[in-house]
Amino acid sequence: MGRKEENIQKATALMNKLDHIRNIGIAAHIDHGKTTFSDNLLAGCGMMSEELAGKQLVLDYDEQEQARGITINAASASMVHTVEGQNYLINLIDTPGHVDFGGDVTRAMRAVDGCIIVVCAVEGAMPQTETVIRQAIREKVKPILFINKVDRLINELRVTPEEMQNRFIKIINRFNELLDRVIAEDFKGKWNVKVEDGSVAFGSAFHNWAVSVPRMKKTNLGFKDVYNYCKNNDQKALAKRSPIHEVVLEMVIAHLPPPNVAQKYRIPHIWRGDLTSPLGKNMVECNENGPLALMVTKIILDPHAGEVAIGRMFSGKIQRGQELYVIGMPNKNRVQQTNVMVGPDRIPIDYVSAGNIVAATGIRDAIAGSTVTDNPEAEPFERIVHVSEPVVTVAVEAKNTKDLPKLVEVLRLISKADPSIQVQINQETGENLMSGMGELHLEITEYRIRNDHKMEIVCSEPIVVYRETVSKPSPHKFEGKSPNKHNRFYIEVEPLPENIVKAIYNNELPANVKKYKKETAKILQDLGMDKNVAKGVFGVHGLNLITDTTKGIQHLLETRDLIMEAFDEVMKSGPTVSEPCQAILVKLVDAKLHDDAIHRGPAQVIPAARNAIYGSITISEPTLLEPMQKVFISTPQEIMGDASRELNSRRSEVKDMKTVGDSVEIEAKAPVAEMFGFASAIRSATGGRVLWNTENLGFEPLPRQLKDPVIKKIRERKGLKPDPYPAEYYMG
């Protein structure tokens, strides 16, 4: 029996020993060495050759990942490690660092309880480091720190041992400062990392060694010795004396919680149901004999097995032949196979129990973010909140018209496997839009459609996704009449305050406001909303709310669901340029309804409510919001002028500029619309001697002078009349 098979046998034996399980993620800024680091952990338990660890990049198994040298997919692996004579099952997820694939990081965080944040000793904590810490804390995932590429400090930058230690202190302080900024009160100070207790390790993933204070005490190895090993080019001996996988996994087992500990504080945070119900209790206790609860965090498309749903088991056990429900979907799904993942390989096992990560086939209705249970009435998990949204779009067409039905199917599969890709299929115009996090994200997805799905496609140039909003409250209520003139709705709209928009975005409001009416009203009142307005809220769509402030109108309750349909329709496609709406509060202030139910059906109510909302937005100074990006540039001083010029030509605003050694760090804010082609432009302007990256910043109002030309351009592209309809058009 090979080490791999032996490892799988041991893993199966450990699956229900909860204290001996750790679910961990590895996250970092791009190029700080996560995948190289994961290789070492796999090698340590015999999953690959130790010689190749750090060079083979097992978890970057996608050919695009190998070609570009970056991680694109979150990859998972389960392995067994022995620490002080005890076996532990480690379920590991390696995540991407590039900002365009941030959605994968957020989804992976839902599946794990702890994570190792990797920071490069040379570059220090970077923008994406801050983002991944925020993503971990948002999911109540405990982070620990690994400082990588220490050998480069010594051999390339020639720092002294004292300077090296000062650098470490600076990185650790910055890490704790970022943590304190976002952590909840109940964990303040408890999750900070310290060198003394071993929650920080230092090393080189490429050269396979690491050290931590507990390890140094055990092996009598000091910082001076580490320094000399690197200086004398003898890192192989150092790797034998202090192998990275041993040091890091000792740190994981000592400092990151097992699932039965983590679920006690994570479940109340990610699930809004009743904690005293059987499902609630069993999830908090992480009980394998309880009702089944699985949260799907990733879908992989396998050419042989079809769709593979990867996710975290919070309660119960999943096995072959079991019939399960995906909450929100009508049909039962039958599990065909349960597996554990090791990079690209799936290893079939009999069952997977609570507290573990499973890869199951046969759950056809699942998408990333689905809740899978054995009871269709169960309360689903909270939606996963992403740090950024899709902001760049391309139109996708099939090269051959006969492939159109296949293209629609492929686009559906693509958006299922990667929920950060949004697909809009317009059957009438035949236009298929695909939106992603950035140019690279779309480029890779196009590549996958062509190669993995063998589809010939033609894509347009990338275009920016805008949002519609209003600048001021409606000057008066707007009347919408039904086609039979028997029903009338009176609507007002106003801008939704920023703190409420933020609360919706951060999942502080229940997704089902109808079910949690009291809780919703209380949260909104605490945020400063008028009591009557807050009590009337009955729907949320994106970052918009609809509320009913009427009193005692007969039959109104029966038409509420139809009004909600009209609201959803308008919020998906606003009156100005048919883009989604954002930060709008829609108020139903009055209504006149026909007594006979026959005269107030969907064909009457929906158009009346829709026209009233459209008209109300039209008279409230509608405007557009454009997506913005934070841009970070690190450039040698002598070419700073070229880098600044490139930024200034793109409507950017420099926020901060500081000199670090002989380079300058620029932090700016720029519209996504102006950032197309920035990668090649900045490379040629600076001869490739510049480090840069971006982070999405959300949406901001479009400058007034650009509003009309942008509206005209979008309407023309969408085949709409040049000017938006005036309010009179919606009066009916």
Image: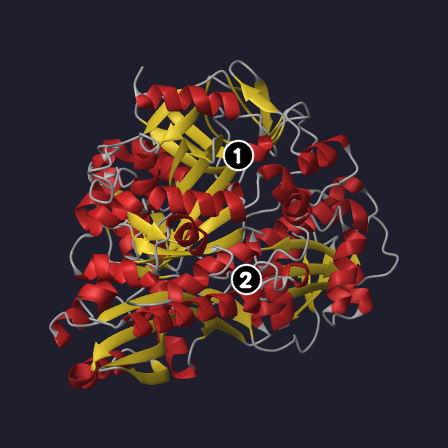
Does dot 1 land on a helix, a strand or a loop? strand
Rendered-image quadrant of the C terminus: bottom right
Q: Could you tell me how far apart the alpha carbons at marks 2 and 1 are, in whole angstroms?
A: 22 Å
Q: Residues within 10 Å of mark 1 (few under 14, many from 20)?
A: many
Up the image or down, 43 lies above or below 697; here it is above
Task: Judge by depth and name the residue closer to the eye, 212 or 412.
Answer: 212
- Between 626 and 242, the one lying in front of the other is 242
Which residue: 53% across, 49% down? 255
Question: Which residue is label 1 attached to?
Answer: 21
State how many labels appear: 2
Q: Is residue 226 visible?
A: yes
Q: Nearer the viewer, residue 151 or 468?
A: 151
Q: Is residue 17 left or right of residue 126?
A: right
Quick check: can you spot residue 677? no
Return the x and y of residue 367 as percentages of the image width and height: 48, 36
Where is mark 2, residue-wise? 192
Crowd band around label 2 with a 10 angstrom C-alpha radius: few (<14), some (14–19), many (20+): many
> For residue 233, which quarter of the picture?
bottom left
Q: Amino acid at mark 2?
A: Asn
Give coordinates of residue 692: x percent, y percent.
27, 69
The image shows residue 689 at horizontal and vertical percentages of 15, 72
Q: Quadrant of the N terminus?
A: top left
Residue 329 bears which disc, if any?
A: none
In this rendering, the answer to whether 286 lies above or below 14 is below
